[in-house]
Image: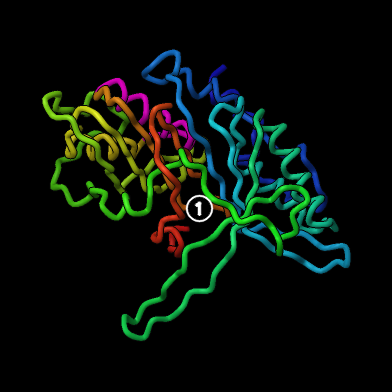
């Protein structure tokens, strides 16, 4: 079934009434298999990874009717059977706005509903928001890094267990500090649909490096609204030509696709065209409607410790 058929009944791109009561039926799952039919490697390669959603506008009422708020992080495994359409996710979270509910019950209900919709075990964490500090010396706001807490059903927000990122996830902050940004390269760009043949690699050079770009732009497949993101590509193997990689990233500029599908396509194209021995593709998209989506796909032999949220994404920019 084509993705367009799947989306015919989704709330995205349609006028919706915002719910006044808790309603798990608002969640609209889409089979991952639909988006994977057109990947350049069939069947899709064995990978590890996850889709990390951050919800910045979660609110509910405590049993006394007092509003509570939280920033929640949802981690959906890449091997789950479905993705969740973003507007339906937002409407579902909004259905708690006037719901009187205990914290523990809220978390258990979220985990149950989202795991059922995704067809996989969804991890939920609470992110601690920090107030920026004004630095008089530099005349700038300093945003301390966010911290996460695991939220088992029995955990109270004040006593939740401190969360350490899984060992395999993403690249280290120190690695990012030494990563190579592609964005200053002076390249000609005239292809704006994903074109894997743009990618080139030098088979005579074996390297291990981290490459980044803030120029990733794709578009919502329903509304055609732009989705802006930072992409981080970590690999070992044949040296990927930096200019060709930047041209390839730019080629997504007219592409309509969900965040998860774009990352999977980038992963497959790099794997097929450049044949790295280890690869990770990770994208951090700016948020829309109170949600951001951050997919990661890595080869099973790729090992790297965790990373906190990018500094550039800690600040609410106009496009967010």
Secondary structure mostly seen in magenta is helix
In the displayed structure, does residue 262 sit left or right of residue 7?
left
Task: Name the residue nearer the viewer: 50 or 248.
Answer: 50
Q: Which residue is at 77% across, 66% downward? A: 67
Q: Is residue 232 left or right of residue 48?
A: left
Examine the image and state in which quarter residue 232 appears.
Answer: top left
Which quadrant would residue 41 be assigned to in this image? Answer: top left
What residue do we see at 31% from left, 49% from top? 175
Residue annotated with mark 1: 287
Q: Position of residue 228 (x, y in %)?
A: 40, 48
**Magenta-colored span:** 255-273
Please tell me which residue is depicted at 83% across the width and 63% down the height of the picture.
62
Residue 296 makes an appearance in the image: yes
In the rendered image, residue 6, in percent from the top left (x then y), is placed at 60, 25
Closer to the camera in the image, 247 or 225 = 247
Residue 14 place in picture, x, y as percent: 63, 41
Residue 226 visible in the displayed image? no
Task: Please tell me how many numbered marks the rendered image carries.
Answer: 1
Left/right placement of residue 320 relative to residue 202 reads: right
In the rendered image, residue 137, in percent from the top left (x then y), is placed at 32, 84
Q: Secondary structure at mark 1?
A: loop
Residue in the image at 26% along x and 34% along y:
248
């Amino acid at each position: 079934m084509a993705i367009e058929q799947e989306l015919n009944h989704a709330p995205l791109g349609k006028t919706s009434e915002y719910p006044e009561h808790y309603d798990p039926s608002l969640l609209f799952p889409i089979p991952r298999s639909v988006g994977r039919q057109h990947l350049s490697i069939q069947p899709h390669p064995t990978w590890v990874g996850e889709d990390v959603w951050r919800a910045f506008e979660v609110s509910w009422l405590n049993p006394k009717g007092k509003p509570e708020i939280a920033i929640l992080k949802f981690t959906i495994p890449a091997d789950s059977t479905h993705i969740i359409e973003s507007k339906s996710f937002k409407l579902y979270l909004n259905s708690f706005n006037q719901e009187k509910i205990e914290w523990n019950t809220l978390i258990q209900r979220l985990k149950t509903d989202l795991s059922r919709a995704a067809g996989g075990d969804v991890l939920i964490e609470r992110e601690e928001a920090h107030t920026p500090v004004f630095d008089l010396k530099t005349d700038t706001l300093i945003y301390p890094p966010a911290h996460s807490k695991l939220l088992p059903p029995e955990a109270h927000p004040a006593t939740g267990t401190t969360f350490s990122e899984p060992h395999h996830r993403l690249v280290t902050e120190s690695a990012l500090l030494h990563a190579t940004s592609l964005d200053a390269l002076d390249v000609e760009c005239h292809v704006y649909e994903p074109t894997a043949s743009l990618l080139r690699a030098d088979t005579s050079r074996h390297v291990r490096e981290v490459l980044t770009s803030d120029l990733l732009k794709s578009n919502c497949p329903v509304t055609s609204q732009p989705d802006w993101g930072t992409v981080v590509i970590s690999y070992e193997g044949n040296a990927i030509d930096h200019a060709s990689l930047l041209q390839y990233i730019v080629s997504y500029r007219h592409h309509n696709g969900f965040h998860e599908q774009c990352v999977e396509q980038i992963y497959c194209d790099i794997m097929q065209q450049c044949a790295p021995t280890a690869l990770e593709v990770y994208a951090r998209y700016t948020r829309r409607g109170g949600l951001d989506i951050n997919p990661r796909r890595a080869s099973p032999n790729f090992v790297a410790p965790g990373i906190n949220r990018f500094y550039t994404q800690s600040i609410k920019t106009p496009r967010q």
